[in-house]
Image (cartoon, rainbow, N blue to C red):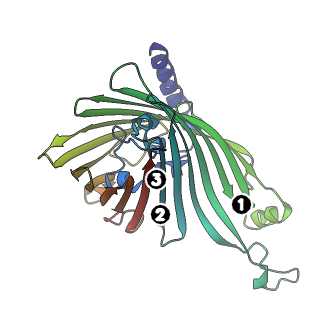
């Protein structure tokens, strides 16, 4: 534990030292989410996630699965269906103390028209020369979770591989790691997730063919060069408590805090070195079969010439559980902040053999 503390302090100091040399929001497609359940709760599930969606939110929760096998799927669409976001995961319980899992994320826009060769050699427009390409971001997570000898404490980690493809023009390869902890004390749950704990290094390779060079020269743009992009560590703290209203109805509020170290972000609390982004949710369960969820995230301050205000993204969702199947639905971004009225549906299935 002492070594982990020194390791953690070192990366905080390292993050602040090199912040000015790094891009903000690096690999931010990995912050979108993975389940409709979490989305409805404002993604405030670091302390409570406990199925194979935990590979995304906190791998320490994987070992709390009650069955040997689990599988999960999520599909959502953004920007009027132009962008597709997909998540798939499967977990296997090795024994009562350890669980492994594999998950895949894809976020992409397909069928983009490439008009670089729209004009033929005589300068005439030829629409048959238009080609199509896709731009997509991929991530593969290899996850492991284990119960600690300390009662109520579990820990886990992800080894992740990043691949980003921008048509025929550029590609990126990255590798990183996450570490998570969960601790349960009676009806209280606590969680900690250190994303990109070693910093995630992404190597960009740009295709510098002659046609592309001519386009950049004619538009007076600089042709990109191969480079390395670094994703700095992010810490997420979570806390939740379950209240029994009746023998059939329970209530569980959740609160998460994201700490980032890659520069000043437009979040509720920010500075040049560290930004703090709170998000919260509340879930009501009936007999642990039907769930109603509310959540708030993306809390931002708007500074106008006349007045200052705070905006946020509200979310709402429902879930049902039967025969080992969990189906969850979320309606997000009701306040029309970024994506208009996004509908998310995720499915989670558990079986013993």
Badge 1 element: loop
Mark 2, residue position: 76
Badge 3 element: loop
Nearer the N terminus, badge 1 or badge 3? 3
The residue shown at (53%, 53%) is: 88
Residue 32: mark = 3
Q: Position of residue 39 (x, y in %)?
A: 37, 54
Q: CA distance from mark 3 to mark 2?
A: 11 Å
Residue 262 versus residue 43 in the image, above or below = above
For the view shown, which residue lies furthest in the front direction?
A: 353
Is residue 304 shown to the viewer in this render? no
For the view shown, which residue lies furthest in the left direction?
A: 246
- Which label lies toward us, 1 or 3? 3
| 144 relative position to 153: left or right | right
Towards the viewer: 75 or 124: 75
Q: Residues within 10 Å of mark 2 (few under 14, many from 20)?
A: some
Nearer the N terminus, badge 2 or badge 1? 2
- Which label lies toward us, 2 or 1? 2
Badge 2 element: strand
Mark 1, residue position: 221
């Amino acid at each position: 534990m002492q070594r982990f503390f020194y390791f953690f302090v070192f990366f905080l100091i390292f993050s602040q030292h090199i912040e000015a040399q790094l891009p903000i929001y690096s690999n931010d497609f990995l912050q979108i989410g993975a389940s409709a359940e979490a989305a409805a709760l404002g993604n405030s599930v670091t302390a409570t996630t406990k199925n194979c969606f935990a590979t995304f939110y906190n791998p320490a929760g994987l070992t709390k699965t009650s069955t040997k096998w689990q599988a999960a799927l999520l599909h959502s669409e953004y920007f009027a269906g132009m962008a597709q976001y997909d998540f798939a995961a499967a977990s296997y319980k090795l024994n009562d103390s350890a669980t492994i899992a594999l998950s895949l994320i894809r976020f992409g826009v397909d069928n983009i028209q490439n008009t670089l060769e729209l004009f033929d050699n005589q300068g005439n427009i030829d629409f048959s020369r238009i080609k199509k390409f896709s731009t997509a971001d991929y991530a593969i997570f290899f996850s492991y979770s284990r119960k600690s000898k300390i009662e109520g404490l579990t820990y886990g980690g992800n080894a992740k591989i990043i691949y980003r493809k921008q048509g025929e023009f550029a590609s990126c390869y990255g590798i990183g790691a996450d570490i998570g902890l969960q601790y349960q004390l009676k009806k209280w749950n606590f969680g900690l997730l250190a994303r990109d704990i070693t910093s995630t290094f992404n190597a960009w390779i740009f295709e510098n063919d002659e046609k592309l060079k001519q386009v950049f020269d004619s538009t007076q743009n600089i042709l990109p060069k191969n480079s390395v992009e670094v994703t700095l560590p992010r810490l997420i703290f979570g806390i939740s408590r379950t209240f029994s209203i009746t023998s059939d109805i329970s209530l569980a509020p959740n609160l998460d805090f994201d700490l980032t170290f890659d520069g000043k972000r437009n979040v509720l609390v920010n500075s040049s070195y560290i930004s703090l982004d709170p998000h919260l949710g509340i879930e009501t369960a009936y007999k642990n079969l039907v769930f109603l969820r509310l959540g708030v995230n993306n809390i931002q301050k708007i500074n106008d010439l006349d007045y200052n205000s705070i905006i946020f993204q509200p979310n709402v969702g429902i879930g049902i559980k039967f025969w080992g199947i969990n189906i969850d639905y979320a309606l997000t971004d009701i306040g029309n902040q970024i994506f208009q009225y996004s509908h998310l549906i995720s499915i989670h299935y558990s079986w013993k053999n």
